[in-house]
Image (cartoon, grey):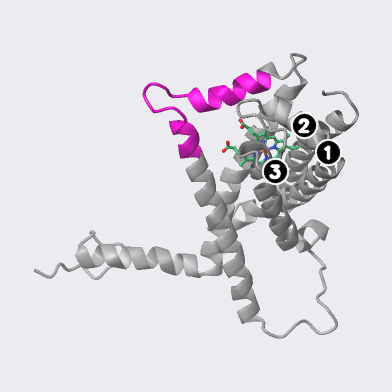
Amino acid sequence: MQAETTGRRNAVPTVRGRRQHQYWLLDLYGSAIGKKAVMAVTGIVLLGFVFAHMTGNLKVYYNDDGESLNHYSEWLRDVGEPVVPHEGLLWAVRGVLAVSLLLHVHAATTLTLLNRKARPVAYKGGRKYAAADYAARTMRWSGIIVAAFLVFHLLDLTAGRANPDFVSGQPYQNLVASFEREPVAAAYIVANLLLGMHIYHGAWSLFQSLGLNHPRFNRWRRGFAALFAAAIVVGNVSIPIAVLTGVLD
Ligand code: HEM
């Protein structure tokens, strides 16, 4: 039997109706507005992670030879046991983060291509950035460099391939050993400054993408974005600096 809908949009789901609904979602993702919504929602997930990660990293400042950070890292692997297997929740969170990151990058790339298609001819005399500030203009490059940093960071402090002194289960000692290499510490500082710029513009524009845009609300939006980005940068950058200056060893 061929199932039918009533002909109205979002009619009772039938075999055909369900298919129409799927296309409707894909159609939405194909539009600039759908891509912006995906970027905003995945951006919120990634902002939440970056903030939680920064606050977790601050455990290095307990004066206990890294015991707090190492215990925290152990807890991330044990949490949920025995209801879920060892590292079960950690892998679930890793999965959500990986999907969010992939969707974020895909939406950003396809949105750029869509915009180029809409305006294939470059602006005469160079583009005028009246409303866009420096952070907004550098979103693409800051995003690409932060993504490259992330690959190095995972090889350095999670897999240990880029850290000759890496010992599994000892994140504090690994972190100190890594930041004692000055070029590596410098790379972390630069990447986190770029991440701060990316977050500043991202946190500001995600409200717009979600339709939360009102003149009275805009000052608050900018303040929130600036404060959020500054907290991430100061918290993260302080750590390689603390190692380089001998505050942490
Ligand atoms: C100076 C700043 C940073 C420090 C000191 C730091 C420190 C660490 C450490 C010690 C680990 C290993 C944790 C463990 O094995 O339990 C780790 C993992 C990780 N970091 Fe960072 N991190 C920094 C910045 C960042 C930034 C900016 C991002 C994202 C853009 C990031 C994303 C990650 C991810 C995805 C993991 C892997 C988590 C996992 O799945 O186990 N980190 N970081």
Quadrant holding ligand 1?
top right
Mark sitting on residue 162: 3
Mark sitting on residue 177: 2
Q: Position of residue 192 (x, y in %)?
A: 77, 44
Above/below status of 172 relative to 112: above
Along the polypeptide, which appears first: circle 3 or circle 1? Answer: 3
Residue in view at x 80 percent, y 32 percent: 239
Q: Main secondary structure of the magenta part?
A: helix
Residue denoted by label 1: 181
Residue in view at x 68 percent, y 33 percent: 166
Above/below status of 134 relative to 79: below
Q: Secondary structure at mark 2?
A: helix
Q: Nearer the viewer, residue 46 or 156?
A: 156
Q: Position of residue 24 (x, y in %)?
A: 38, 66
Q: Give yes or no for contact between labels 2 and 1 (Cβ–Cβ under 8 Å).
A: yes
Say whether residue 17 is left or right of residue 52. left
Q: Which residues are magenta?
A: 68-93
User: How far is the residue under mark 2 from the one under mark 1?
Assistant: 7 Å
Q: Nearer the viewer, residue 1 or 9?
A: 1
Image quarter of the C terminus: top right
